[in-house]
Amino acid sequence: MTVDLTTRLVSADPTGIAAAVQCLARGGLVAFPTETVYGLGADATDGAAVARLYAAKGRPRFNPLIAHVADLAAAGKLGIFNSDADRLAQTFWPGPLTLVVPRPQSCPVCDLATAGLDTIALRVPDHPVARRILRDFGRPVVAPSANRSGHVSPTQAAHVMADLRGRIELIVDGGPTAVGVESTIVACIDEATLLRPGGLPRAAIEDALRHPLARAARPAESADEAPLAPGMLASHYAPRARLRLRVKDAGPGEAVLAFGPDVPPAMRRAKVLLNLSPAGDLVEAAANLFSHLRALDRAGVASIAVMPVPPEGLGEAINDRLQRAAAPR
Ligand code: TXA
Ligand code: MG
């Protein structure tokens, strides 16, 4: 991960917004204001851009990210809305509410952004700068809060600069944010469930639904922690196949998830082999992680042999996810 980029600060005028849109289109990282906190945006359909985003934040884990769009019509192309989701979206969007809904096959958001899950978090922010960027860009933008992992969420451009200078391309200065805490997250999978309290009060949501929200077993304590959600809302992607980690051999009938240029001959002979990054690039490996696991799983093998992935940089998050995927169930 390069940490010596020049971070440009631009104002939220048409020139600044055009620069933000161009930067996103080139796979760059752009911090911009929303009504809650400043978000760090990347093109949600670009796996490499999303991998760079995790690296810039220094997140030790690939938590699933929120896809931001300009309006409900755009959100409807990314998720499947039941009647609760539809009612909440109609009532509160644009606004500080994120909806977690099932993700259709046709969803163009990359697997890394949703951390391999079959659900997706969607939000239409209520901020003129955010909406202008989203409308002009025309694709979904993932945007976690624009702070280094473990730091508090930024509510001013100067906070973003202090945390991420040299790690991102652009900051759009739209002044201080109004709400100051992150969006409320509600899952609408079966029973509407509060996953994270936030800028929209629970009572307002329950009024609109005309019934109480279920509460997640353990709601997220901080925005950077994935909520450990109950039942269908498994918070981690889990392949059907068993995973053997940090190995350099493969049994008959076993699939191989390789990393780097030096794939041992015993593994190269496997019928099903995918390489996270033949060049040994951790950003590329992160971008491929969930889609490769899914593809190997689809091949119907009982077991996947996974080569060692070095622990530095994004390797830490990659290893974290591999370990979770390998955990006995
Ligand atoms: O106000 C906000 O929501 C800000 C602004 C920038 O929009 N964004 C934000 O993003 O707080 P972030 O990445 O810090 O928090 C996203 C939360 C995480 O706790 C993540 O686990 C959860 O959303 N999340 C995302 N996708 C999910 C999914 N499919 N299922 C359950 N939780 C999900
Ligand atoms: Mg955060």
Image: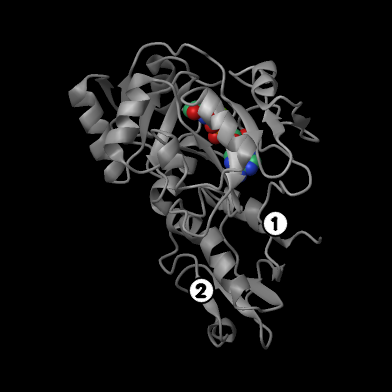
Determine if the C-beta at disc 2 is less than 8 A from ligand 1.
no
Q: How many marks?
A: 2
Query: How far is disc 1 from disc 2 in space, using C-alphas?
Result: 18 Å
Q: Are marks 1 and 2 in contact (CB under 8 Å)?
A: no
| SS for dot 1 | helix
Ligand 1, what quadrant? top right
Tell me the crowding category of disc 1: few under 14, some 14 to 19, or many 20 or more residues within 10 angstroms, Cα based: some
Amino acid under disc 1: Gln
Q: Residue at x 45, y 28 (%)?
A: 39
Amino acid under disc 2: Leu
In the displayed structure image, the side of residue 310 where residue 160 appears, left or right: left
Q: Which mark is residue 274?
A: 2
Give the image quarter of residue 329: bottom right
Which residue occupies the foreground of this view, 147 or 228? 228
Q: Which mark is residue 323?
A: 1
Give the image quarter of residue 126: top left
Q: Residue at x 65, y 55 (%)?
A: 237
Which residue occupies the foreground of this view, 152 or 196? 196
